[in-house]
Each structure stands twice: as C-alpha cells, then as structure tokens.
C-alpha cells in the first residue's frame, strides 16, 4: 500500500492544488495545524525531540481481514476470502488494472444453520479514483468521523453485500477503491472480496469465481488482533524529560503482525500494520501542558487521526495534514501535523491507523508547554 512509484504523479498534484514548499514557508504563520520548515530554519528546534519514549503494546483477540494483494488486479475473481465470527475488521485496497469497467464488492454469507446478525459498527469507503492519496486520506477522514450502527440479518446460508452500494458502483480502468468495515458477526460468516464484470450477478459469481494469486508484495491475510493498545512505559513528565517522541510503523520498536493467508495457508506479514487501529493513551505527570505532533518520516503522507479528551469526551477527527492535501514529499523539508495542546492532568486517548497510499513510519512528538 506504500506508493513510492507515484512520486511523479504527486508533482502534478502539487500544480493542481496550487501549492509549493516555498509558498508554505512564506505563509507558515497562516497555517493552523500544518507546519512546514526547511532543515535550516531555526524553528525546527522547537519541534524536534531527542528523548525516545519506550512503549508497551498489547493486541486484542479480535480478527483483521486484510485484502491488498494483488493490489493492481488484472483478472476477475476472488481477491481474498475467509470465515470469521465475533469482533472483526475488514480492510480492502484494490486498483482495477484491466481495460474494462469492473465492480469491486464484498459478499458475505451466513455459514450457520441458524439466522445470523451482523452488526456494522464503523464503515468508510472512498473511490473509485486515480488520485491514490485522495482516496487514502478521505477513507481515513470518514473512518474517524461519527458513525451510526446498522444491522444485517441473514437467514441460514443466505448471501448479501456488506455494503449494498458495492453492487451499483462502477470501477473504471485505473480506479482505486479503499474500504474499512468494523463489524460483529454472531455466527460464522464467510467474507469474500471480489472483482467482476459489471454485468455479473455477484451473489452467484462468488460461488464459482477463481481465487486470484497474490502479487509479490503478499499483502493479504487474516490476523489476530485488530486493535493495538500502546502507552509509554514510564510516565512522561515534561518538566523533567523535555521533548520526547515514539514511532509507529518502524518494525523495530513497533513490530508488524504475522498472520495466515486463508486462501493458500501460507504465513504472511502485514508490512505496515494496515488495518490495525492504534489506541494510544499517554501516561502523564507533572504540571503544565503538552503539545502533540505527527511527523511523517517515510515519504509522502496523507491521513487522519482522532483524539478524545476526558473519560466522557468525544473523539475529534484531525486531518494529517489539515490545510494541505499531503506532505512528506520533500527530503530536505520537515513536516509536522499539529494534534493539539492538552493539560497534563487530562486523560487523553488517540486513535490512529496507517493510511493507504502513504508511507511509514511516523513519529509522534510530545513538546512541553508552559
């Protein structure tokens, strides 16, 4: 899902959005939540941290279904398929690499002899579009915004679409579709991500469609744990520790998950932990306030994050970056997305997941404030 190959495409995007790094530096005071600084700018010192926070992490026992291989699809068939029960998340990310219009859909089938209730808790879909960063960012924004729960009721062995709009959506050649669904299945439920001609009856085609081989990146599989809970091992005292940071998605301090590809029983690694939602609750002590920033380190980046203040607070979505369509594309430039300033006495909770079409790792920076 990392799109280094689209750097030339980004240059045209910069023209379309009428934005340049030079303009960003000149207008830096006007940017509310996005900070763009040249390496030689003395203000960089305000945002760079040298204290690494060591993190504790724990994954839950839910299930993640991840479908991103083949990412560029060149024949019809089933992209990924497995049967789940209980608390689950599905993430799919596929590009129509054929010349003809197609449908990309998720078909679900009740595998029980009893009726099944599927509760869809959160859902976000974007595309089709050839603007991969736009699709990635919009999906994140929609996922971290408010949602209404809905139910799907299936009779024994009945099939339907996880998202009814799938059956109507046409994906043209070159179009990317990105979807995330959080759901709970009371009984075993077969989930099939598929691509097919627009004139096919997808609820019938799923019975005989071929299972497509994965591409060289092998980004698909079933993983235990869709939620990762992280916090700093030692309480952060800004008066004593100063500016601090930690990584998400570096595969050193934050390891990528291993799982199984149910279509061929092979071991697979989620290189990037796509579909994993990080729940970060910082341990804080001391007086004053702390500001939080997200800094992209791997290259071009466009996503969103969510933050809640207080035990009974509501999550607020923050685009990363906010005023710009993307950032992170210039090696000699430092980019920071401002995530807010909060009292150290506040109970904070951040939700984050790696966005498709963007690059990892990211750095979360904590800066003391008076």
Image (tube, rainbow, N blue to C red):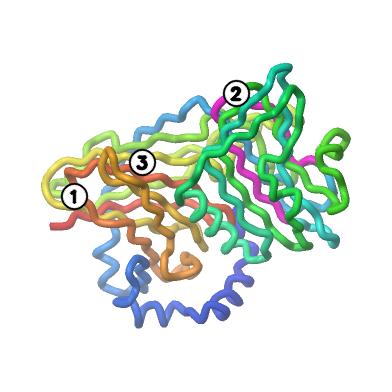
Compared with 151, 33 (above or below) is below
Q: How many tags in the picture?
A: 3
Which residue bears the numbered disc 2?
A: 186
The crowd level at tag 1 (other Cα within 10 Å; few <14, some 14-19, many 20+) is some
Are the residues at dot 3 and dot 2 in contact (C-beta closer than 8 Å)?
no
Q: What is the distance, in whole Å, between disc 3 and disc 2 at their CAs? A: 29 Å
Q: Which residues are magenta?
A: 78-95
Q: Is residue 350 left or right of residue 139?
A: left
Instruction: Say if the magenta span includes residue 87.
Output: yes
The crowd level at tag 2 (other Cα within 10 Å; few <14, some 14-19, many 20+) is some
Secondary element type, mark 3: strand
Which residue bears the numbered disc 1?
A: 343
Compared with 182, 103 (above or below) is below
Mark seen at residue 119: none
Compared with 179, 42 (above or below) is below
Res 273 seen here: no
The residue that appears at 43% across and 59% down in the rendered structure is 319
Secondary element type, mark 2: strand
Query: Residue 178 location in percent, x, y?
Result: 63, 52
Q: Earlier in the sequence, mark 1 or mark 2?
A: 2
> Could you tell me what secondary structure mostly forms the magenta stretch?
strand
Compared with 346, 57 (above or below) is above
Give the farthest residue toward the top.
113
The residue that appears at 76% across and 33% down in the rendered structure is 159
Q: Is residue 71 left or right of residue 223?
A: right
The residue that appears at 41% across and 82% down in the rendered structure is 23
Q: Is residue 341 left or right of residue 167?
A: left
Q: Nearer the viewer, mark 1 or mark 2?
A: 2
Q: Earlier in the sequence, mark 3 or mark 1?
A: 3
Mark seen at residue 280: 3
Query: Residue 124 location in percent, x, y?
Result: 57, 49
């Amino acid at each position: 899902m990392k799109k280094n190959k689209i750097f030339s495409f980004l240059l045209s995007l910069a023209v379309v959005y009428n934005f340049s790094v030079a303009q960003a530096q000149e207008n830096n005071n006007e940017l509310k939540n996005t900070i763009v600084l040249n390496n030689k700018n003395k203000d960089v010192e305000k945002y760079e941290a040298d204290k690494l926070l060591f993190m504790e992490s724990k994954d839950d026992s839910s299930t993640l279904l991840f479908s991103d291989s083949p990412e560029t699809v060149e024949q019809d068939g089933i992209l990924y398929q497995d049967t789940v029960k209980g608390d689950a998340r599905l993430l799919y990310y596929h590009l129509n690499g054929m010349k003809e219009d197609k449908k990309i859909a998720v078909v679900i089938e009740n595998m029980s002899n009893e009726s099944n209730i599927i509760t869809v808790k959160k859902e976000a879909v974007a595309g089709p579009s050839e603007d991969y960063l736009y699709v990635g960012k919009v999906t994140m924004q929609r996922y971290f915004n408010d949602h209404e729960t809905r139910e799907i009721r299936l009779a024994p062995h009945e099939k339907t679409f996880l998202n009814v709009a799938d059956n109507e959506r046409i994906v043209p050649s070159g179009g990317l579709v990105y979807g995330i669904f959080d759901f709970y299945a009371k009984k075993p439920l077969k989930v099939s991500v598929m691509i097919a001609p627009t004139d096919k009856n997808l609820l019938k085609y799923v019975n005989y469609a071929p299972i497509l081989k994965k591409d060289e990146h092998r980004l698909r599989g079933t993983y235990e744990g869709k939620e990762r809970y992280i916090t700093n091992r030692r309480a952060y005292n800004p008066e004593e520790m100063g500016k601090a940071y930690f990584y998400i998605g570096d595969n050193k301090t934050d390891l990528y998950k291993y799982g199984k590809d149910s279509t061929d029983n092979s071991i697979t690694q989620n290189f990037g932990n796509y579909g994993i939602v990080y729940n970060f609750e910082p341990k804080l002590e001391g007086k004053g306030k702390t500001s939080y920033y997200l800094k992209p380190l791997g290259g071009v980046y466009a996503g969103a994050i969510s933050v809640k203040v207080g035990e009974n607070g509501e999550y607020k979505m923050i685009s990363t970056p906010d005023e710009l369509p993307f950032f992170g594309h210039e090696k000699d430039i430092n980019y920071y997305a401002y995530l807010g300033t909060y009292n150290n006495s506040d109970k904070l909770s951040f939700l984050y997941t790696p966005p498709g079409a963007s690059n990892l790792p990211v750095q979360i920076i904590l800066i003391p404030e008076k």
